[in-house]
Structures are given as structure tokens and as C-alpha cells.
Amino acid sequence: MSRAIATLRTLVPGTAEPGWRELCDALADVLDGSSANGRPIELDRLKSRVYRLRAGENGTVRSLVVKRYDPWLARRNELVLRRWLPALDLSDRAPRLLATAVERGGAWAWHVYEDLAGDPLDPQDPDPLQVEAVVDVIATLHTRAAGHAVVPQCRHFCGSLGAGFFAANVRDAIAVLEALAPPRIEPTPAQGELRGRLLDRLYRLRGEIGARTALLEAWGGPDTLLHGDLWTTNALVHSDQARGTRVARLIDWDHAAVGPATYDLSTFLYRFPKAERPWILEMYARALRRAGWRLPSVRELNAMFETAEYARYASRIIWPAVALLEERAAWGFDQLAEVERWFDALELVLPEP
């Protein structure tokens, strides 16, 4: 192993990261002698479990991103990047996965990615050309994957974000909230009222499962491969000023699954101010038309977008409630109050006639 790789092991204080030794062994293969030996390595922590690594000298610097996963999330990302996107001829629209490393006990896995050039979209002041580059990638993913063999494979490994996801999350959220009561939990009066208000919302959504399922079946289109977490921070755009081109790539495929395209589209559109959403949707519609697809009316779209949001809100109720039941987690009711604020603030994505 090169001297630089050996010293990398000392760059995480207290060797706190599990599997760091195994990761360094994998990096020795990625940063071979021509690019690492005897040359400095810099390590920056980007967020929990994610680092940027730079190796080399001026003119020969190589930048990588390393990320620690639960093993099943690592497998999901590996399948997307090494199997499903290549099958759709879209491997150049995501980062390359250069190496993997598994912690000796099997509890964690590391991925080594190329560090992509580019910047995330600015949702408050969106550049139409950058947005168009991202929208084209999203529409191409959705239209190419629909009916493709990657869909049943992805469903098998990653599940679905369609009507079943909505129904299961609503029912599971009801079950765990109903359990947040004496003798298992002794909520304060304010906490009990919060629980009751959330249950009232969920009971109403439970009564709408049939109608919302029928809507998705009628207007949602074929199941396709979904990114599953289309925040603007997960879309990078690199501008080549000399050529006048913009290349968009999607990162962080931790939530990839199958389902209707409106699940991805709702996440993406909700990130932008209301005034920006109609022209962004029109860009997506134009991209779909090139593949022979048509969007349903605004009324149907709004209802499907709302269903996707409610599914996500119900999912976010489940886990703090579980933490309260199992661990008496002090933060649990604070998280539930935050979800209630999301319910209160939810608006239609698009203006209706």
C-alpha cells in the first residue's frame, strides 16, 4: 500500500468510521501508484457518512466521494448504477461507482464514487436552461424504463412507491399512533391532542385509499424506474461554456424504486415556488411528447401529486412513533409536530382552472 493510502487511515479522528480500513484497501486500487504514491491526500467531511477525498498534486489532482451505507442501501445503489442505468443507456447520467468495500462484520458498506463536476439547481432562482437539462434526464429515465426488464428487477429489490406505498404507510402510521396511549405511553395533554389530530387526518386518508388507488391506476401511467428522492440537491448540472452545453446528472439513488412517474415529479415540483412550477411541468410534458407520452389534466395531476406527498408524510409519522414506543425517544413528539406542520402547509402543486 502506498504511503499516502497508509496515512489516510489517520485522517478520521479516533478511527470512528466502521470499515475505514477496508475502505482504504479499496482506495489503494482506485488511487493506484500513478496517482497516489507519495502524494498528499486531503479529506473533507461533507455530511454524516460522506467524505470528499482529493489525492495528487497540482495538475494531477483526483477527487472522489466516499459514502458509508447500510448494506441493503449499498446494494440498491450498486444495482442502479451498475445494472439498471446501463441497461437504459443512462449510465452517463449518474456518478460512476468505482469501488466498494464491506466492513469486516458486514454491518456497513462503503462506496467510492467519482466526484462529479457541476452545481445543484437553485430552486428559488431557477435557470431555465439548467432546469431543462435536469428535466430531460428525468423524462428520459421515466420513458425508457417503462415496460423495460429493469422494472420487475427493481420492484423485487427495492419495492414500489405507488398506490400500495400510500395505503401501507397510512395504515402503518395509524397503527403506531393508536399505540401511543396508556399504558404503553403517557403523553402530556398537548401531546395527546397532537396524536388525535394526526389520527383524524390519517383516518380521512384511509377512507380515501380506494379512490386514490383508482386514480393512480387510471391516470398514473405505467410503472417505471424512479429516482425516489428528486430534491434539487440531487440534480447536478455542469455547464460547458465553450460548447454551450449543459449536462445534468442525478446523484444519491438511496430511494430508487418503481412506481408512477408522478411520484418523482411531485417531489421535484414541490421544491420550486408556485410561480415556477407550470413552466417546469411544461418542459417535462414536452420531453414526454417526444417519446409519445401525454400528461393527464392538471386536476388529475394535482390529486396524484397530493397522494405522493401524503404517502411520504405518513411514512415520516411511522418512525418517530416507533422510536417513542420502543425507546421513549424524547424527540419523537417534536418530529410528529413537524409532520403536522407539513400537513397544514400542503398546497396544490399547480393552479387549477
Image (spheres, rainbow, N blue to C red):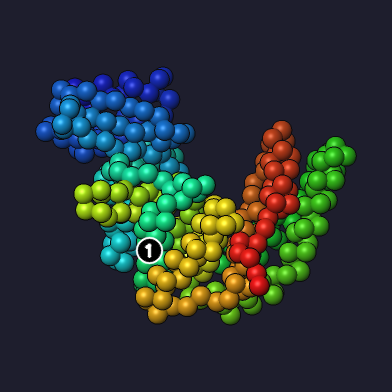
Relative to 300, is 333 above or below?
above
- Looking at the image, residue 245 sits to the left or right of residue 346; the answer is left
Residue 75 appears in the rendering: no
24 or 144: which is nearer to us? 144
Q: Is disc 1 placed on a helix, strand or loop?
A: helix
Which image quarter holds the N terminus? top left
Q: Residue at x 43, y 48 (%)?
A: 121
Q: Can residue 20 be seen in this view?
A: yes
Q: In which quarter of the image is the C terminus?
A: bottom right
- Residue 46 in the image: state x and y as whole percent: 42, 33
Left or right of 308, for residue 7: left
Q: Quadrant of residue 106?
A: top left
Return the residue at label 1.
Answer: 136
Q: Residue furthest right?
A: 189
| Residue 113 coordinates in the image, percent (x, y) | 30, 43
Question: Image height check: is 45 above or below 198?
Answer: above
As rendered, which of 339 and 295 lies closer to the eye?
Answer: 295
- Pointer 1 local density, CA inside 10 Å: few below 14, some 14–19, many at least 20: some
Q: In this view, does 166 lie to the left or right of 199?
A: left
| Residue occupying image coordinates x 31% and y 67% | 88
What residue is rendered at 39% in x and 60% in y? 132
Q: In the rendered image, which quarter is residue 157 located in?
A: bottom left
Quick check: 180 left or right of 111?
A: right
Of the residues shown, which amino acid type is indicated by label 1?
Answer: Asp
Q: How many labels does the image show?
A: 1
Q: Looking at the picture, how far across and down is residue 292, in whole percent? A: 40, 80
Residue 348 position within the rendered picture, expressed as x and y whole percent measured from the top left: 65, 62
Give the residue displayed 27% in from the left and 31% down from the top.
Answer: 54
Residue toward you, 259 or 303: 303
